[in-house]
Amino acid sequence: MKSKSPATIAGWGLTPAAAGRNKWAAMTASIWMQCVSGSGYTFGFYSPLLKSTQIYDQQTLDTVAFFKDLGANAGVISGAIYSSSPEASRPRLVLALGAVQCFAGYFFMWLSVAGILHRPPVPLMCLFMLFAAHSLTFFNTTNVVTAARNFPDHRGTAIGIMKVAVFYVK
């Protein structure tokens, strides 16, 4: 059996210098992901179009917005998937599931607004919005947990920098 060099980390063949670069690359990627995945904040931009093309009154639009807020704040599923998946594939799996969910939710909303899909019933549009907004919890879970694990002595600082950069850009 081949012994592992003491200069490698956790048997992955990474030197401490390479591991340091990888955690900073992950932090940079997380900041960028947080910056571009803010679709939940843009509801005000596209809600007038949603209201006019789907012939919604303000109360119906508020119902759709409620499901946006519900989806964006219910991150239990993404956390459970992250915790129960194999450690090597955790970030990739959760990000992939979030991307699929985001695409599905916004794609069906777009199909409805563009007139390609016949105007769906309000509960179905609420489900589309729930899926689209819920995908953000998958990105947040992956980014926050990865930052906390990569910077165990500076978890709060790392997560704070990532979140502040997001609000600064938006």
Image: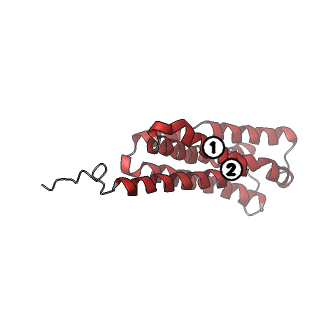
Disc 1 designates what residue? 163
Disc 2 designates what residue? 38
The color scheme shown is secondary structure
The amino acid pointed to by label 1 is: Lys
Residue at 21% over, 53% down = 4
Residue at 45% over, 38% down = 152
Viewer-nearest of labels 2 and 1? 1
Residue 25 is situated, as x and y percent measured from the top left of the image, at 50, 56
Residue at 80% over, 39% down = 62
Residue 73 is situated, as x and y percent measured from the top left of the image, at 63, 36
Of residue 47 and residue 163, the one placed in the foreground of this image is: 163
- 79 versus 8 height, above or below: above
**Which one is earlier in the sequence, the residue at label 2 or at label 1?**
2
Residue 146 is situated, as x and y percent measured from the top left of the image, at 48, 45
Using a 10 Å C-alpha cutoff, classify the residue at mark 1 as few (fewer than 14 neighbours), some (14 to 19) or many (20 or more). Answer: some
The amino acid pointed to by label 2 is: Gly
